[in-house]
Amino acid sequence: MSRDMVLMTIACPEGTPGLDRAAELLGVPAAEMDRGFGVVVLDPQKGLYAVQVHETAIRERPTADTGGQAVKGPFSNPRIEPFGPTRK
Amino acid sequence: MRVSVIVTIPAKALVRESSQLAFSRERHDPIAAPTKRGGFLVDPAFPPLPMAARTPGKVRLAASHAEKAPVFAVRGTIDASRIDDVRSSGRGVQIFADPQIGMFKDPYCGVEAVGTHTDVARLLKFDQLKDKGLDGKDVALAVMDTGVNLKHLKAQGLAPKLDKKISWAPSNIRNTPGDYVVDHGTMCAYDALIAAPACSLLDFPILQSETPGGSVMAGFLSDALLAFSYLHQQFTGPDWKYKALVINNSWGMYHPSWDFPPGHPGRYADNPNHPFNIMVGTIARAGADVLFAAGNCGADCPSGRCQGVTRHSISGANAHPDVLTLAACDIDGVRLGYSSQGPAIPNMAREKPDLTSYSHFLGSQAFGEGTPDTGTSTASPVAAGCVAAIRSGLPSGKVSPRDLFDRIKAEAQKKPWPKSGWNNDYGAGIIDPLPVAEHFGL
């Protein structure tokens, strides 16, 4: 995963969106989406999904088209480590 | 069963005199006959102690001596089933618990192993669980870690099963389930197999995603998110063939500086609405048993990676209300000084850790001969193995993860004192799977 990607969530009650639809909901060009990450189902009952997007695209979105309550983020993506010994 | 109690009684001439004589070193005849109500038998070695009042607000120093005290406390024993007889007798008699107390052993901060995996199996009553057919058979146990090395596990005398069809790896590393370098993940797999040798391991090497050559085995939370999402799809899909899914997570975020700053709406540590925390809730609601290590930031000897932060160090998914969070003790029940203590970070589930499990014993030897399996990293898979063992007789469709975890906590061996309830070192106590199995009729 590239570190200039940011983690976002989108609400899409009509069902799992494709990347293009997710980009539309986010208000960013589809080319800015992280295709390797894809669209992750977070809570199927609530129609909630996670995606990753280029940070610059999120920053440069028109302020009038930020998705309202349907879009949340960016969220932290911290480093995680084992709680025990490692060889490195 | 007779239990020790403390009873307060109104001052009477005989009691007052007995108290005065006991402290005057003169010979006296203590009261030794059982009472009519409840069969309370006074302990003759414990003199009636003058109490200045029944409540703190009414204490007067002048009334604190035997000559003027309005109330006296005596110790004795009573049949546990007759405590209410005394309580209902009225006449100013009150009855109180007299709990056993003892020296608290200092938390263990040594380097050397304490006991072996054989001791852990004995403490978990593995033989009795196995006799009941509770050995993890037909249960999937996912190891979210650095990857598993089957050859090493076999060299240690185990016969592990691995389901290679259900596996996932971050995009920048090769997906070779069961064939990763011997490291932390192999240690965790070994420890899970102590109680559940017949479970099917699922290999998720999420802690290898950082650029090769990095200073530590590590990953990013988004890798865990993808892994959980993949596993959720498998678990809820039509081809799922196991009785239950247990997910072990011996990892976390060591320091708040790795996260967004406090108050940021996208922060992970204390945000139930963070995508990963939502994902954990989703898979738990679907019926998966999710276990997390509490962390190694205990106040007595925290890991250097904690950078001195030992308060509210249980955070993020490790403090999620739907997961079982494990603290660590040695085989003697002594808390390991590095085991993170509660309460958890505000805004998540306060009463973490939930439970304590065994660690710091000679087990996998993944880090060389004679090197112990340590950290809450070990405690969590030991407990995950217990859960998998129980699940081999109790499919997740029958009892939800929440109900199973509640029962596991209820049946825990109470530590550090024989009292029910949560404490910040041990949670509900030390895991004891056999009475849990018996409770569910297994």
Image (cartoon, coloured by chain):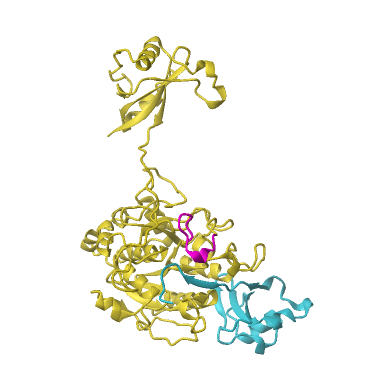
Residue B187: x and y, percent?
Answer: 35, 72
The answer to which image quadrant residue B361 occupies is bottom left
Residue B93: x and y, percent?
Answer: 42, 21
Give the number of callouts: 0
Q: Quadrant of the N terminus of chain B?
A: top left
Q: Which residue lies furthest to the front in this view?
A: B111
What chain is colored yellow?
Answer: B
Q: Is residue A51 left or right of residue B439?
A: right
**Quick check: B442 above or below B192?**
above
Frontmost residue, B250 versus B200: B250
**Quick check: B250 above or below A28?**
above
Q: In this view, does B325 lie to the left or right of B103?
A: right
Q: Residue furthest bottom?
A: A31
Q: Identify the residue at image location x=46%, y=61%.
A: B294
**Quick check: B96 above or below B258?**
above
User: Does residue B240 show up?
Assistant: no
Q: In this view, does B250 lie to the left or right of B431?
A: right
Q: Identify the residue at image location x=60%, y=79%.
A: A51
User: Does residue B327 show up?
Assistant: yes
Residue B23: x and y, percent?
Answer: 37, 17
The answer to which image quadrant residue B261 occupies is bottom right
The answer to which image quadrant residue B359 occupies is bottom left
Segment tinted magenta in the rendering: B297-308
What chain is colored cyan?
Answer: A
Q: Quadrant of the C terminus of chain B?
A: bottom left
- Taken as a whole, is the magenta stretch helix, strand or loop? loop
Q: Identify the residue at image location x=27%, y=63%.
A: B116
Residue B224: x and y, percent?
Answer: 50, 75
